[in-house]
Image: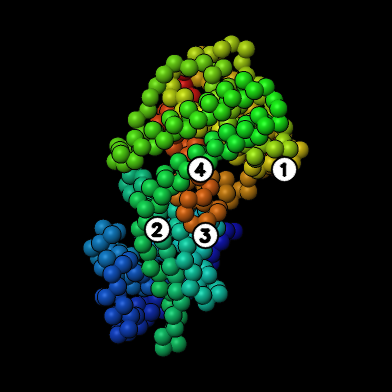
Amino acid sequence: MDTYFASAKRTERRKFKNQITTISHNPLMDSLLKTSAGLLVILNEDRQIVSINHAFLDALGIEDIEDVLGCRLGETLHCIHAFERPNGCGTTQHCRTCGAAIAMMTAINDNQIEEQVCAILSDKEGNFDDTCLLIKAAPIVLDNNRWILVYAQDITQQHFWTNLERIFFHDISNILTAVYGNIQLLEAGLSENEEIKSIQTGIERLIREIQVQRTFSARKQSGLSVSNTTVTLDYIKKDLRMIVSGHRSSYEKQFIETWPEENVLLKTDILLVSRVLSNMIINAFEASKPNDTVRLTVHATEDYVDWEVWNNTSIPPDIQKRIFQRHFTTKSRFGRGLGTYSMKLFGEKYLSGKIFFTSSEEQGTVFTFRLPR
């Protein structure tokens, strides 16, 4: 199979040299390249670079334009997937969900201007870097030749901080929803003392969340300060039940929990642990249908504790490949699809744990959070 997405074909060498000559002698293209304040590259219909402006060359750290002529965009950006297959950028399975590839193919096939967010993981001599680009691809016809203008804007930091702010409100919303659900149960005449206690716990947790976010915002360069305390699995279980039991995503669905008989002690940040686990469970509820079951299974060993959350819905293979990628979302451009991203961020970066999953149509989906003891 030559390709999983875009055409593998590249322009014949002699024709490509003629294309470079045509572009270099076109006054309009020359003016665009010289006056464009952003990053601009001109592609032929086989997505090969026929010209590029100095701003883009500087951003790539390239001095000689000959080093990029004939290459495709992902190849010049050192995308880790660009060289997975012999035919290069645009032809791998990952390219089907690449914003840059989608924008370019829309311009080529549909003759329309298209703007997409491109989340790219690059490898420059062993140095890996996450970058988020806003890509706009526009077709243009000059002297019976058709070109694709590609404008790129680095929105990495903007996207990162937008996500962090959105994660905060996302998680706060989950907690407030739980508190509201508990109030509804209280109004229905359930045990007053227990429900009031749940509401009080929710409010206290909300206060702690706000304090954490205030610290996070004040330390944008260094990140979050983790507060480790000794907690029991029973405490974590009660904290989770407070959040999950009142959340609207759990309505009309069954929740089955299996915890170890031993009340294991952990030294960790309970707030962050709870945020990771509540996102795992709520995501499973949101992916499930009415009358479906979500299962939480907890295993404890001498070295770690595993929380496994299962639901019967599988994740499409294309989405599986990018489920944790920092800037990737299947929803809107900014600030959506944050549950899995925040799980990875808090669970691994700040708690030194491990987040992973398996998913298939036969077995459903299992997300696992492994936390060292």
Q: Can residue 49 be seen in this view?
A: no
Mark 4 secondary-structure assignment = helix
* Mark 4–mark 1 distance (CA, rounded to whole Å): 22 Å
Q: Mark 2 points at which residue?
A: 133
The number of callouts visible is 4
Q: Which residue is drawn at 34% across and 30% down?
A: 225
For residue 72, which quarter of the picture?
bottom left
Circle 2 residues within 10 Å: few <14, some 14–19, many ≥20 = many
Mark positioned earlier in the residue sequence (3 or 4): 3
> Is 2 on the left or on the right of 215, as rendered?
right
- Give the number of the mark in front: 2 or 3: 2
Asked if residue 47 lies left or right of residue 54, the reply is right
Cα separation between marks 2 and 4: 24 Å
Q: In this view, does 317 lie to the left or right of 32?
A: right
- Indicate which disc, 1 or 3, sits on the residue closer to the N terminus: 3
Q: Is residue 342 above or below residue 372?
A: below
Disc nearest the viewer among 2 and 4:
4
Kindly state the secondary structure of the residue where label 3 is placed.
loop
| Front residue (pair 153, 124) | 153
Q: Are marks 2 and 1 in contact (CB under 8 Å)?
A: no
The residue wearing badge 1 is 289
Pair 4/1: label in front: 4
83 or 104: nearer the eye? 104
Q: Mark 3 points at which residue?
A: 91
**Disc 3 crowd, CA 10 A, few/some/many (<14, 14-19, 20+):** many
> Label 4 belongs to which residue?
170
Image quadrant holding the N terminus, namely bottom right
